[in-house]
Image (tube, rainbow, N blue to C red):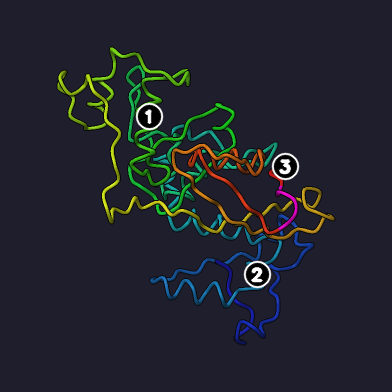
Amino acid sequence: MPEPESSQPPQEQQPTALAAEDLGFERFHSVLHKRTVMSVSGLREEVLSLYHTWRGCCGVLLFLYSVILAKGIENIRNEIQDTMEPLIDPVHGHGSQSLVNLLVTGHAVSNVWDGDRECSGMKLHGIHKQASVGFLTLMESLRYCKEMSLVGPESPSEQARRVFQSFDPEDNGFIPESLLEDVMKALDLVSEPEYASKVLTPKSRPGQDSGIPDSFPIYHYNGLKQSNHNERVEYVEGTALVLGFEDPMVRTDDTPVKRCLQTKWPYIELLWTTDRSPSLN
């Protein structure tokens, strides 16, 4: 973390050299300074004291370097599957899966499945612990990849969908009757043959909270000028409505933003405060 160049309060601090818009690559690294803090409150104070620096053109790099140093370079190397793979793609500038996992979960593993797996004697590391934040990708809606349950909090209904999909990998919407007992076992339900022959619709218990809000605020940000209305980069605010298993009678839209969120909440509707849906492009 860079040293502040002024002892003035944050609101009066003058921009440092790191905040300059025309700062070159070599100049940027020549003026970097490392500072160690021992508490969250100390970290917050340091960040606020360097507000102009973090807000500058190199703020993202400062954040990335701080995360890497806080985690430890050697620890990151031990967690990455292929140490020859760069954290940032040198051609397109995309973050690798290891970098995304590091920022979301604190571990730079290269995979998104639950726990570790073995493949031809090789141990492949995945996600071991539930993170407080999640990461959704449009690639999953296109079936290029599949996120696992530990990437985001899993509700009972989502667990049921996951189990059903494991017995219906082609997404046909049907499970053979012969597999009903196995499905009920996977759901931790009574699975004796005499019970498996009858499927009852469970009723919600009075006062039982599913833990899933009926609605929540949603904010969208796209930093590309050409992807914003009138090429003005700004946040777009909206409301997400989670409808459970019921397929809505009226659909609000079918945009990439919605399809991305549907990988987590299949029956979700989005109501934006603007007259146009934001773009992911």
- Residue 43 is left or right of residue 277, and the answer is left
Q: Position of residue 16 (x, y in %)?
A: 68, 74
Q: What number of labels is visible?
A: 3
Residue 78: x, y in percent?
Answer: 39, 40
Q: Which of marks 2 and 1 precedes in the sequence?
A: 2
Membership of 6 in magenta stretch: no
Going 63% across and 53% down the picture, which residue do you hit?
271
Q: Which residue matches tag 2?
A: 53
What amino acid type should be assigned to the residue bearing mark 2?
Thr
Q: Position of residue 106 (x, y in %)?
A: 42, 50
* Furthest residue in direction right, as rendered: 230
Q: Amino acid at mark 3?
A: Asn
Secondary structure of the residue carrying numbered label 2: helix
Q: Residue at x 58, y 33 (%)?
A: 139
Nearer to me, 217 or 15: 217
Within-10-Å neighbours for mark 2: few <14, some 14–19, many 20+? many
Q: Residues within 10 Å of mark 3 (few under 14, many from 20)?
A: few
Nearer-the-camera pick, 85 or 281: 281
- N-terminal-most mark, 3 or 2: 2
Residue extent of the magenta highlight: 274-278
The residue beneath circle 3 is: 281
**Amino acid residing under circle 1:** Leu
Mark 3 or mark 1, which has the lower sequence index?
1
Viewer-side residue, 74 vs 162? 162
Q: CA distance from mark 3 to mark 1?
A: 32 Å
In the drawing, does residue 11 fall left or right of residue 146? Answer: right
Q: CA distance from mark 3 to mark 2?
A: 28 Å
Q: Quadrant of the C terminus?
A: top right
Q: Residue beneath label 1, please?
A: 124
